[in-house]
Image: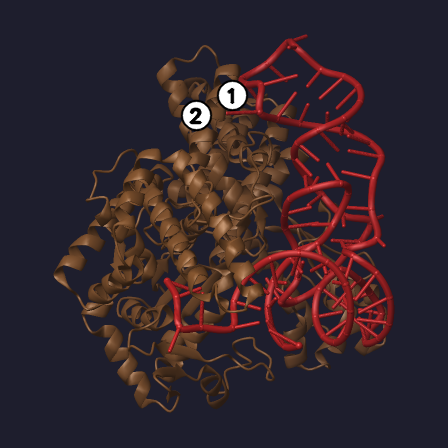
Amino acid sequence: MLSISINPFADFREECKSLLREAVSNHEGVRSLGSSWIKSSLKRLEPPPNPQFGELTSSFCFEASRRLGIKPIELAAEIVERINLSSSKLVDEVKAEGGGYINFYVNLPNLASLTINSARHLDLEFGRVKAEKTERIIVEHTSVNPIHPLHIGHARNSVLGDTIARILEARGHKVSRHYYIDDVGRQSAIVAYGYKLLRRPKPEGKPDHFIGAIYSLTSCLLEIKRLKGEIETIKWTCEREKLAQLQRSLDEWVSVAAELKERYPELFGKLLDAIEKVEDPEEEVNRLIRSYEAGDEEAKLLIREVCQICLEGFRQTLKRAGITFDSWDWESSLLWSGEVSGCVRKLEETPYVSREGEVLEFNAEKVARDLNLKRSLGLREEYEVPSLTLTRADGTTLYTTRDIAYSIWKFRSADRVINVVGMEQRLAQLQLKLALYALGYMEEAENLVHFAYNMVRLPGYRMSGRRGRYITFDGVMDEAVRRAYDEVSKRSPQLDEDFKRRISEFVGIGAVKYALLSTDPVKPVTFTWDRILDFERNTAPYLQYSHARACSILRKVSWEVDDVEADYSLLRKPAEKSLILLLAKFPDVLIEAAESLKPNVVAEFAYSLADRFNAFYAALPVLKAEPPELRSGRIALVDAVRIVLRNSLRIMGIEAPERM
RNA sequence: GGGCCCGUAGCCUAGUCUGGACUAGGGCGCAGGCCUUCGGAGCCUGAGGUCGGGGGUUCAAAUCCCCCCGGGCCCGCCA
C-alpha cells in the first residue's frame, strides 16, 4: 500500500513533538513546573548541527533542569525513558546526548518510501502545500516609469516580485501581478515633449531604448537651457559661490550632452534645432503636465502614445525573462476617474490633515500616536514620523497621495497587497500605510506589505536615467546569452546550431535571474559581469545541469528490466540519506519561503539539493546498481530528485531543461 | 541633527527574526587529486575566519540589549 504525504518531514516532526509532549507529561518533576510553562518552553524542534545527532533535537532540558535543580543530561535521560516508540512510523530512535539534548533519529526506510512515493505521485504539486486560508493577493512589482529601458536594478525588482508571486501561488493563494504605470508628472511630460518636438518619429530599434534616448536628450537639453538661464539672471549679483556651483553643474551637463551627441547624432541634432526655436520650453513642459492631469484630449493622446511605445519594449524584455503581468494600472486613470480627489477629500475630513499656506499636509505622526501604532510598525516611541504633503500650492497631487488612492483601489480586489519597492521608499510606504489607517482602512493597512529590497550598485559610478547612463536588463541578458553560447559551443560542439541557441538562451537568462534571487533582498548587490555571468557551482546553470543529468539517467532506464519493486530500506548510504532528507523537507522550505517572503531560501535549497545529487551521482551507480531492488530504489530516488529540482526551478521562473 | 538598512576568510555569501552541541556552512579564487561505471557546466582533498570593535544579559551569543566605528539610504510643493 502506498502512503502519500504532502509534507513528509512535517509528519516526522509532528511525531517527534507528540512523543516529547507525552513523555514530558509523564514526568512528575517536569509536570510540577506547570503546564503553561512547559508549553512555552517546548519550543520548536531544531535541526541538529550534525547528522550524527539525528534529524531533530530539543533543548528543552537545559532550562527545565535548572528549575528542577538537576543536570540537563539526567533530565533528558529520564524523559527519553518515558518515550514509547511502539506506534511510531517515522521515528526510529530517541537519545539523550550532548549534555542535555534530546535527539530524534528518523526511520530512514519509512521516510524514504513516504517521500519518494509522495514526490512521484504528486509530481508537479509536490511541495505546494496549500495554506489554510486562501487569500487574494496583489503583487505589485517593477512599476518602472515608462521613460527609459529597464536597467539591472529594476531587474532585481522584477525577478523578486515574480518569484514572490510564484511562491504565494504555490501556497494556493490567488495571486495577481500588477504593474503601476507612473505616467503622471514631469518625467513623462519631458519625454513626451521631446517626442512631439521630433514630430512623433517612428521608433528605431527597441522601443523602450528609443524612448530612453529621447528622454535623456530632452532632459539634458532642457537642463542646459535652464542652467544657462539661471546663470544669466544671477550673474550680476554677488553670489559667487552659487554661481560657481551652477557653472559646475552646467559643465557636467554639457559633457553629458557631448556623450549623448556621439551616441545619437541624428536625434541630437534634430532635437537641438527644435528646442532652440522655442522661447520657453520649460513652460511648455509644465503646461503639458497640467493639461494631462486635467484630462485634455490632445495631451492624453500624446503621453499615452509615448508610454505605450516604451511599455511595449518592457513587455518584450520581461517576456524574454519569463515575467508577465495580469494588470497594467495607469496612474492617470485614478486621477481622471476622481478617485484621487475623492481620497484627498476624505482625508481632509479626518483630524490628520491641515492646510499649511497653500498646501495640504498629512500629519502621519499624529495617526501613529493616536492609534498607538508605533510599536506594531516597528518604530521607536521617540521617533517622529515626518508629515506628508498631499497637494501642491496649485492644487495638484503628489506621487504618494495618488498611491493612497491606488492602494485603496487595489484592496477592492485583494485581501493582501505586496508592493515590491526599493528600500529607499520606506518612509513613503510608511506614510501610505498610515494614511490608510487615518481613513479607517484598518484591515487594509495591516495587509499592506512593503517588500523592500536593496539597490544594485555599479562599481565606481551611479546609474542615471537622465544622463543615459545605465546597464540595461536587455544588455545583461544579451551578454549572458552570448557567453552561454561560447560555453555551449565549447562543451557540446556536436549539437546543432539551433539547439545551441536555445540552450544558451535559457542558460544565460537563468544565470541572470538566479544571481539576482540568491542574495538576501535586504543586502545591497554590486553589479559585476563576473558575478552575474557565472556558469559553475552555485548558479542556475549548475541546477539546470543537475536536472538534465537526472533526466539523462531516467531516459536510459529500460522499464522491462527494471520493473522490480524498489526496496527503499537499501537506500542507506550517507549520500542517499541526505538526498532523502532534503526531498522530504522541500514542502517545508516552500512554506517558509511563502510565510516569510524569502525567495532566496528556495535558491539555497535548490543548490544544496543539486550539490547532494552530484555527490551521489559520483559516488554511487544507479543503472548498474545491484541487486535489482536497490537499482529500482535508486531510480525512483533520482526521479524524485528530478521532480523536486524542476519544481524548485519553476518557482524561481527558471527553465528546467531535459538536455543541455 | 534624527531615523532605517548593511558589515561573516583575498572576493561573494548562508546562518541573525525564533540564542543551544558554532570547533561558523557554501561558492569564486588558490594548491593537490579523480576521465574502464549512468553527461567533467562534475566529484574528492587541502590551506584560508579577532562573525566590524567594545561592554552587558544568559547555563549558552554570529544571533538578544547598550555604546562606538565604517558604508549605504531616507528625512522634497521629486517619483
At x 67% / y 36%, what residue is drawn?
A574
Decide which of A604, A623 is in the foreground and name it: A604
At x 43% / y 57%, what residue is drawn?
A227
Callout 1: chain: A
At x 46% / y 80%, what residue is drawn?
A387
Could you say which quadrant of the image residue A45 lies in? Answer: bottom right
Q: In the image, residue A213 lies at what x, y percent?
A: 35, 42
The label on residue A38 is none
Q: Mark 1 points at which residue?
A: A487
Q: In the image, residue A478 lies at what x, y percent?
A: 42, 31
Kind of residue at badge 1: Glu
Q: Name the residue under label 2.
A: A504
Horizontal side, residue B71 vs residue A484: left or right: right
Which class describes the residues within 10 Å of circle 1: few (<14), some (14-19), or many (20+)? some
Horizontal side, residue A345 vs residue A72: left or right: left
Res A658 visible: no
Kind of residue at badge 2: Ser
The answer to whether B10 is drawn above or below residue A558 in the figure is: below
Res A61 visible: yes
Q: Chain B is drawn in which colour?
A: red
Q: In the figure, the brown chain has which letter? A: A
Q: In the image, residue A23 lies at what x, y percent?
A: 68, 67
Label 1, secondary structure: give it. Answer: helix
The reply to whether callout 1 and callout 2 are in contact (CB within 8 Å) is yes
Badges 1 and 2, same chain: yes
